[in-house]
């Protein structure tokens, strides 16, 4: 298994920026696709972004494309999500997750095997 711990959330004004981090330990971090998801109160968990093991292939939800950037450091075993031009509708608990079995449907929460505890991001208008 892989243990994941998110950090970096907080309160930010609309238009501001936040960088989330996800520290991984356990199995070889560099071998797996990683993803960020978010869940707002009363809503289902939704896909935000994913990154392949090599860091070169990245995928984004339409709602965050052009504003968020996912990256990874396979030496430091850390996943990042740089969030710019934040909007109140970005308010949610953000989770990082790892896909240990190589699924191609990176946007589906059920394809991910291990999850962090989540970090709250609140964007005020």
Image (cartoon, rainbow, N blue to C red):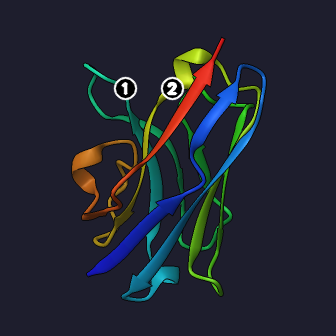
Which is nearer the N-term, disc 2 or disc 1?
Answer: 1
Q: Residue at x 33, y 57 (%)?
A: 117
Badge 2: how crowded within 10 Å, few (<14), some, or many (20+)? many
Q: Which residue is mark 2?
A: 91
User: Measured from the top left, where is residue 22 in percent x and y?
Assistant: 52, 65
Residue at 48 percent of width and 60 percent of height? 6
**At numbered mark 1, what does the secondary structure look like: helix, strand or loop?**
loop
User: How many angstroms separate mark 2 from mark 1 (CA)?
Assistant: 7 Å
Q: Point out the image quarter for the C terminus.
A: top right
Q: Quadrant of residue 55?
A: bottom right
Please tell me the numbered disc located at residue 17: none
Residue 48 left/right relative to 81:
left
Residue nearest the viewer, comparing 106 with 88:
88
Residue at which label 1 appears: 40
Question: Where in the figure is residue 108, as x and y percent of width and height?
Answer: 31, 43
Looking at the image, residue 100 lies above or below residue 77 = above
Horizontal side, residue 24 vs residue 115: left or right: right
- Residue placed most toward the observer, 38 or 74: 38
Above or below, 115 against 50 in this view is below
x, y percentage for residue 97? 38, 59
Q: Is residue 60 above or below residue 58?
A: above
Callouts 2 and 1 close, C-beta under 8 Å: yes
Along the line of sight, which residue is nearer the eye, 13 or 23? 13
- Asked whether, in this view, residue 46 is left or right of residue 61, the answer is left
Q: Position of residue 116 (x, y in %)?
A: 35, 61
| Residue located at (53% from left, 81% from top) | 30
- Farthest residue in the front direction? 11
């Amino acid at each position: 298994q892989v243990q994941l711990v998110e950090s970096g959330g907080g309160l930010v004004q609309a238009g501001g920026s936040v960088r989330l981090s996800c520290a991984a330990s356990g199995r070889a971090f560099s071998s797996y696709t990683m993803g960020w998801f978010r869940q707002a109160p009363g809503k289902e968990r939704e896909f935000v972004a994913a990154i392949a093991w090599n860091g070169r292939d990245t995928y984004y939800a339409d709602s965050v494309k052009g504003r968020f950037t996912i990256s990874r450091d396979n030496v430091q075993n850390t996943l990042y999500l740089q969030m710019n031009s934040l909007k109140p509708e970005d308010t949610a608990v953000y989770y990082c997750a790892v896909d240990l079995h190589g699924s191609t449907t990176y946007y589906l929460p059920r394809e991910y095997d291990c999850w962090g505890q989540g970090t709250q991001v609140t964007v005020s208008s």
